[in-house]
Structures are given as structure tokens and as C-alpha cells.
Image (cartoon, rainbow, N blue to C red):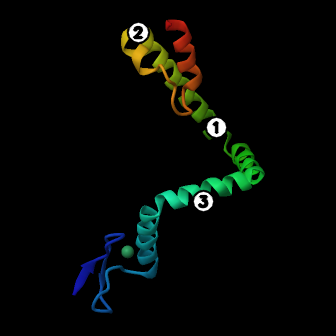
Amino acid sequence: MKIKCESCGREFIRIKHNQRFCCPKCRTKVAGERYRQKNKEKLKEYNQKYRQKNKEKFREYTKKWCLKNPEKVKAKAKRYKDFGNEVLNQAIKHPRKFLGKYKKPKGKIGVYKKERLHEEFL
Ligand SMILES: [Zn+2]
């Protein structure tokens, strides 16, 4: 009897009576996802610590990636700029709405623009 793999959806023939996945790869993939879901906080903390410990390594890696993918870096910069401009345009159109919304800039994207907004409107 053919059944569908719970991970990739491919049809396969059961070898063991309780088999749910087509291959070990699919099984480990699902197990890994479940583990990450279960230990989200722990992993987050671990990753943060690891990043802190290996700052230089990550910086080096990012540098290399940027040199390798200049067009992606450019696209990202453009998105960032566009987003900022969009926020600015919206704020100019609806200053009241934005005054409340952008009092405390949160996150990384557009913080600069939001701070500028704050200065402009207060
Ligand atoms: Zn599969």
C-alpha cells in the first residue's frame, strides 16, 4: 500500500508497519523541526551566545558574502531605502496617524527614518 510521506508528500511504499516518512532525510528533517519548535528559547539563547563569542568570525563571513553577492547587497539597500521613503511619505500624508505609531522606533529597519520623523513632527 502506498502512503504519502508526512514531510515531503511523496508517495512511497511502507517497509515497516509504522513508517511515516519516505527516507531518513525526511524523518530527521521533521524531528529537527520539532526539536527547534520545542526548544526555541534555548536555541535562541545558545545562538546569541555563540554569535557573541564568535563575532569576528561572523563579521568575516558577512564581509565575504557581501563581496560575493554585490547585487543582493544593492537590492537590500534599495529595499531599505524604499521602505524608509514609504514610511516618510505616509507620515507626510497622515501625520496624525504616524505620530502615535512611531514614537518609539522599534527594530532595525527604518529606525533612522523613524527617528527623523519623530524630530520633524514633534
Ligand atoms: Zn519524504
Give the residue at x 68% y 39%: 70
- Residue 104 drawn at (x, y percent): 50, 23
Mark 2 to mark 3 CA distance (whole Å):
42 Å
Secondary structure under the numbered disc 3 in the rendered image: helix
Assess whether mark 3 and mark 1 are in contact (beta carbons under 8 angstroms): no
Q: Which circle, 1 or 3, is nearer the viewer?
A: 3
Q: Which residue is mark 2?
A: 95
Q: Which mark is residue 99?
A: none
Which amino acid, mark 1? Val
Asked if disc 1 and disc 2 are in contact, CB closer than 8 Å, the reply is no
Position of residue 35 measured from the top left corner of the image (x, y, whole percent)? 45, 68
Real-space CA distance between mark 1 and mark 3, rounded to the nearest whole angstrom: 28 Å
Q: Secondary structure at mark 1?
A: helix
Q: CA distance from mark 1 to mark 2?
A: 32 Å
Judging by the rendered image, the residue that carries numbered circle 3 is 46
Q: Nearer the viewer, residue 97 or 69?
A: 97
Q: Amino acid at mark 3?
A: Tyr
- Secondary structure type for disc 2: helix
Residue displayed at 41% across by 68% down? 34
Q: Nearer the viewer, mark 1 or mark 2?
A: 2
Q: Is residue 92 left or right of residue 65?
A: left
Quadrant of the image occupied by residue 80: top right
| Residue annotated with mark 1 | 73
Q: Earlier in the sequence, mark 1 or mark 3?
A: 3
Question: Which one is earlier in the sequence, the residue at label 1 or at label 2?
Answer: 1
Q: Amino acid at mark 2?
A: Pro
User: Is residue 15 placed above or below 47 in the rendered structure?
Assistant: below
Which quarter holds ligand 1? bottom left
Task: Establish whether ligand 1 lies closer than 8 Å to the Cβ of label 1.
Answer: no
